[in-house]
Amino acid sequence: MRLRAWAVLPAVVAACLLAAQPAAAAQAPVEFHADSGDQCQRGVTEGTLEWVEGPVVRPTVRVAGDLTDGGVNSPCAIDDMYSRASFSAYNGTTLVDTELVKADDGTVPVSLSLSDATGVAAIDRVVVQVCRFSNTPIGLSYCGPVSEYKR
């Protein structure tokens, strides 16, 4: 009977080691901020970026925060424009994913994930920018400075 237990022991140890794979590695969240670059900062986005990677998990950056477009509470006059925040993920110089969030005279939550469509490429930096666009077909648009965050 003891002989059988010793024969089974290596198989049990191997099964335990395979089952105990490391969990997804996550860095501490990085705070981000970007604005429309105008005097009133009519468009502002801020929140956190969280890199999640691991041997079994698809490399992802989780984005959480909000985008505010200056409305009735803005110290500047209301304009007929909206704000759009872009979140672009890169692996080196290759664009991996881009997500857009729009706000018009208010605040909207930002909750999204950036990842490679194939699930392979890691993300080493995220570029955030806020642009403002006219609500009418004819009008101006402008963008604030680019904010870049590295893993």
Image (cartoon, rainbow, N blue to C red):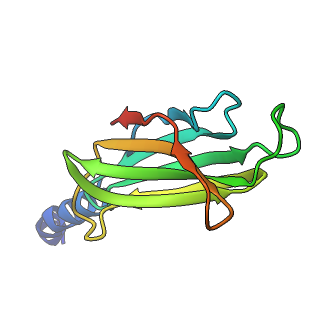
* Residue 151 sits above or below residue 112 on the image: above
Which corner quadrant of the image does residue 108 belong to?
Answer: bottom right
Query: For the view shown, which residue lies furthest in the front direction?
Result: 138
In which quadrant is the C terminus drawn? top left
Query: For the view shown, which residue lies furthest in the top direction?
Result: 39
Q: How many numbered markers are drawn?
A: 0
Query: For the view shown, which residue lies furthest in the right direction?
Result: 72
Q: Position of residue 87 (x, y in %)?
A: 45, 51
- Regarding residue 23, the answer to whether it shows in the image is no
Q: Nearer the viewer, residue 118 or 40?
A: 40
On screen, residue 6 versus residue 141, left or right, reads left
In which quadrant is the N terminus drawn? bottom left
* Residue 68 sits above or below residue 33 on the image: below
Q: Nearer the viewer, residue 24 or 142?
A: 142
- Regarding residue 45, the answer to whether it shows in the image is yes
Q: Residue at (82%, 45%) from the top-left corner?
A: 78
Q: Position of residue 8 (x, y in %)?
A: 17, 69
Which corner quadrant of the image does residue 139 belong to?
Answer: bottom right
Q: Nearer the viewer, residue 20 or 4?
A: 20
Q: Residue at (68%, 62%) from the top-left corner?
A: 135
Q: Position of residue 86 (x, y in %)?
A: 48, 52
Q: Position of residue 72 (x, y in %)?
A: 88, 44
Q: Residue at (27%, 55%) from the top-left corner?
A: 95
Q: Nearer the viewer, residue 39 or 24?
A: 39
* Residue 118 sits above or below residue 134 on the image: below
